Amino acid sequence: MLETKISYQYEKWDYFVVLTFVLTTGTIIWFHYLSPGLSLSFYFLIATINLLVRDRKIRLVRNLSFYYCIYIFIIALLGGVLFYSHYVENATIGYLISAISSYLIISTYSFVYFKKILTNVVFYITLIGELVFILSEFDLLPLQSIVIAGDVKIIFYGYSLGWPNLFHRFAGLWHEPGACQIILNTVICLHYHEFVTWTWQKNQLLKMIIIIIGVLLTQSTGGYFVFMLFMLNVMFGVKFKYKHAMFLKLLLFILGGVIIWHLYHSPIIQEKIFSDENGNESMSKIQRTTENLAMFQMFLERPIWGWGLGTHEQIEMFDKLDNGGCSNGVLYMLCSWGVVWFFPFLWMVYRNMKQMYGHFFMIMLLAFFLMQSNERYLEFPMSFIFVFQFKREGIYG
């Protein structure tokens, strides 16, 4: 009850905090164009002020999330002194700031309250973005061009539409559709309890439908597979308290199976998996495969401590192995910090997934790693939702 009173008292501020949380998760204008250093510094400032606003003094919640932040700081410190070459990028500092700031924010809120605000923020971003996307497809908007790291990006007031040509796919505020689906699918996955019990608050289902439409408009193969795994988990977890519960569950399985079948046989997934050798999808697949093999090779060469995050040796090996994209977030972190990072990280995600999703949590664990294998997004705030613990007053529901 106390949490609820405090939450409503500072609700406007909380919306600002969560909006900053979302914008710092790799949005094209706020994070890339403004610069990662400035956006992460502002994010850390807001996370620190948030403690003062809500508690009048800085009080750290000493849970597993707190000790994980200390642990990765020790990894970065010891690795830099004992194992890694000198740093040429600020990737390590960026990851630490993002992780610590996300811990400060996530540990301040209950899961239910944070989910509500996050859903509302992402809903409005998605709703406006879908209107922008549809109008841009009919050439009804005056588009703008900006240059980020030498690449020309086509935008409309922060909404990403292509580089250098139109995507003809929904990307929202993020640099490409594959990144957008991570944010949208994350919000969808947080509503497992609502899907299983089919209990929705006012307008909550409508917001979820708009966000799901956003996932479909991304036309992201990885995004479709993640959504299919989530629906599969819902089908296993749903419970009907009616006389004909078994019949209703069978009907749901059939309906869910039809939806999954249609998603799998959609042109987007079929072209990605079974593309022609000379097609654009084939080139994309070859490039991603090359990048994945390069990072996996680097991990095998230094499996314990890795090459360091943003070190001279890591960048040199990336250039040598023609890995310019680092599009797989899991492999990127594995080749950077090795198993000393991976196993504690896996334990944190495993533990939270088990609490969130119950008996069939392994399906969602697979969905999480599939989602993070599509883009280098493990270092961004949204990904820490499944890593860090919320305030214990709330339950996962």
Image (cartoon, rainbow, N blue to C red):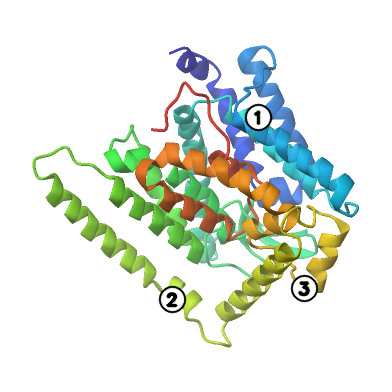
Identified at 68% across, 38% down, the residue is 99
Residue type pointed to by label 1:
Phe
Q: Position of residue 329 (x, y in %)?
A: 64, 56
Which residue is more in the foreground, 100 or 307? 307
Please state if 70 lies on the left or on the right of 378 as rendered.
Answer: right
Kindly check if marks 2 and 1 are in contact, taking CB atoms under 8 A apart as contact.
no
Indicate whether 92 appears above or below 263: above
**Which of the 4 image quarters holds residue 312?**
bottom right
Q: Secondary structure at mark 2?
A: helix
Q: Position of residue 221 (x, y in %)?
A: 49, 66
Q: Is residue 354 visible?
A: yes
**Which of the 4 image quarters holds residue 387?**
top right
Q: Earlier in the sequence, mark 2 or mark 1?
A: 1
Q: Which residue is mark 2?
A: 270
Q: Earlier in the sequence, mark 2 or mark 3?
A: 2
Closer mark to the observer between disc 2 and disc 1: 1
Q: Residue furthest right?
A: 86
Q: Which residue is mark 1?
A: 66
Closer mark to the observer between disc 2 and disc 3: 3
For disc 2, the neighbor class at 10 Å (few under 14, some 14 to 19, many from 20) is: few
Which residue is more in the foreground, 84 or 318? 84
Q: Which quadrant holds the N terminus?
A: top left
For disc 3, the neighbor class at 10 Å (few under 14, some 14 to 19, many from 20) is: some
Distance between mark 2 and mark 1 Cα atoms: 43 Å
Q: Secondary structure at mark 1?
A: helix
